[in-house]
């Protein structure tokens, strides 16, 4: 959906609490945020944990 709507230039940032927000895909990452970057596998694990909490 993001590729269709934003041409792949925007994506969702999804904090542990609260609502998702849009971010630019190619924006620089601040030093503070660098530690929160994750692999695709890590993202899948995070989503599974979030689903367990919300079910």
Image: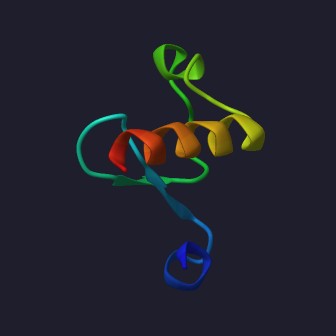
Look at 37% across and 50% down and name the residue there. Answer: 55
Q: Nearer the viewer, residue 9 or 18?
A: 18
| Above or below, comparing residue 29 to residue 24 in the picture | above
Image color mode: rainbow
Classify residue 38 as left or right of residue 47: right
Q: Quadrant of residue 28?
A: top right
* Depth check, front residue: 42 or 23: 42
* Residue drawn 55% across the image and 30% down it: 29
Image spot of residue 11 (x, y percent): 51, 59
The one of 46 and 37 positioned closer to us in this rendering: 46
| Residue farthest to the left, as pictured | 18
Please determine whether, in this image, residue 14 is positioned above or below residue 31.
below
Number of numbered discs on residues: 0
**What residue is at 56 percent from the left and 37 percent from the top?**
46
Q: Residue furthest bottom?
A: 4
* Quadrant into which the N terminus falls: bottom right
**Residue 46 to residue 8: above or below:** above
Q: 27 or 35, which is in the foreground? A: 35
- Residue at horizontal 53%, vertical 15%? 31
Q: In the rendering, at what x and y percent does residue 39 appear? A: 74, 36
From the viewer's perspective, is 15 left or right of 8?
A: left
Please tell me in which quadrant of the rendered image residue 2 appears. Answer: bottom right
Q: Residue 19's x, y, as percent?
A: 26, 50
């Amino acid at each position: 959906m993001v590729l269709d709507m934003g041409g792949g230039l925007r994506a969702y940032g999804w904090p542990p609490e609260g609502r998702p927000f849009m971010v630019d895909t190619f924006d620089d990452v601040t030093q503070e945020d660098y530690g929160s970057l994750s692999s695709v596998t890590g993202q899948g694990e995070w989503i599974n944990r979030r689903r367990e909490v919300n079910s």
